[in-house]
């Protein structure tokens, strides 16, 4: 059984998969409390689903599936869910907050690993050894709320060679930093990163759950 906050079809709004139709499986529960979190409703509650029910729920939907949260790696059955989706020919992305080991997630999946900048309030909880496990399919995301976050991210990219050549997404925190301002900083410093503008927030700015 897995504790599920919601299952829905939408357009992927983040990472290099942005713009693609996708089925989202949002698992409930999270071990972090980021100050700018935009899915607080997924921190608690959720309904019990069997693995078979979840597999049935994605049938007939887009080929891409995103397993997200909350924090999906809190649940013991998440690796089995990811494997089952992959075995059915699905293209699977797993979004994780960077505080728990990612090694149990099938390497055929694309793992989107968050690295929490200082504004999150959770930087000290990052499991930095996860960077040793990244494959070419995996990506890194850093939410940027202010100039201090950006400076932190730029310094991290400069000193940690494990991030060299990786797809690193910098995402402006909604309502706290404009995308254009972050873009200017990236261009001025010639950072080799990807600006991530949360496409779903642009398409459906007033939507809550299910987007």
Image: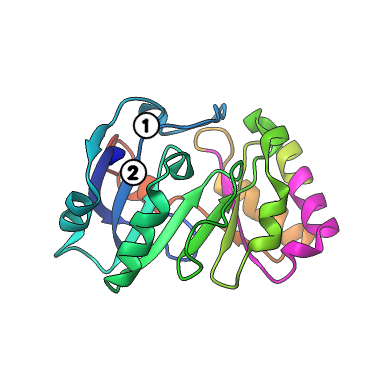
Spot occupied by residue 65 in the image (x, y as percentages of width and height): 32, 60
Which residue shows up at 28% across the image and 41% down it? 1
Image-based side of 33 in relation to 148, left or right:
left
Quadrant in the picture for residue 70: top left
The percent coordinates of residue 184 (x first, y second) are 68, 54
Residue 72 visible within the image: yes
In magenta stretch: residue 68: no
Earlier in the chain: of badge 2 and badge 1, it is 2
**Magenta residue span:** 152-173
> How much space separates mark 2 and mark 1, taking CA atoms?
8 Å
Asked if the residue at tag 1 contacts the one at tag 2, i.e. Cβ–Cβ closer than 8 Å, the answer is: yes
Q: Which mark is residue 42?
A: 1
Q: Residues within 10 Å of mark 1 (few under 14, many from 20)?
A: many
Which numbered dot is residue 89? none
Q: Mark 1: which secondary structure?
A: helix
Q: Is residue 160 above or below residue 149?
A: below
Q: Which residue is mark 2?
A: 26
Left or right of 139? Residue 205 is left
Position of the C terminus, as image quadrant, is top left
Does residue 12 show up? no
Residue at position x 22%, y 51% in the image: 54
Residue 60 x %, y %? 14, 65
Residue lying furthest right: 159
């Amino acid at each position: 059984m897995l504790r599920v906050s919601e299952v829905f079809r939408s357009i992927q709004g983040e990472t290099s998969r942005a713009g693609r139709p996708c089925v989202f499986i949002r698992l409930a529960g999270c071990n972090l409390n980021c100050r700018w979190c935009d899915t607080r409703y997924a921190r608690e509650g959720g309904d019990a689903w069997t693995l078979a029910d979840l597999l049935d729920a994605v049938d007939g939907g887009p080929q891409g599936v995103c397993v997200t949260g909350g924090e999906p790696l809190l649940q013991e059955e998440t690796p089995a869910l990811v494997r089952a989706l992959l075995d059915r020919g699905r293209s699977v992305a797993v979004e994780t907050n960077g505080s728990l080991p990612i090694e149990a997630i099938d390497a055929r999946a694309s793992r989107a690993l968050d690295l929490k900048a200082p504004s999150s309030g959770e930087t000290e909880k990052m499991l930095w050894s996860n960077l040793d496990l990244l494959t070419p399919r995996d990506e890194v995301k850093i939410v940027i709320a202010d100039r201090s976050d950006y400076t932190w991210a730029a310094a991290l990219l400069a000193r940690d060679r494990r991030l060299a050549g990786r797809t690193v997404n910098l995402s402006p925190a909604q309502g706290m930093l404009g995308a254009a301002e972050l873009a200017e900083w990236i261009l001025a410093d010639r950072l080799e990163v990807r600006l991530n503008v949360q496409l779903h927030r642009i398409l459906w700015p007033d939507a809550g759950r299910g987007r």
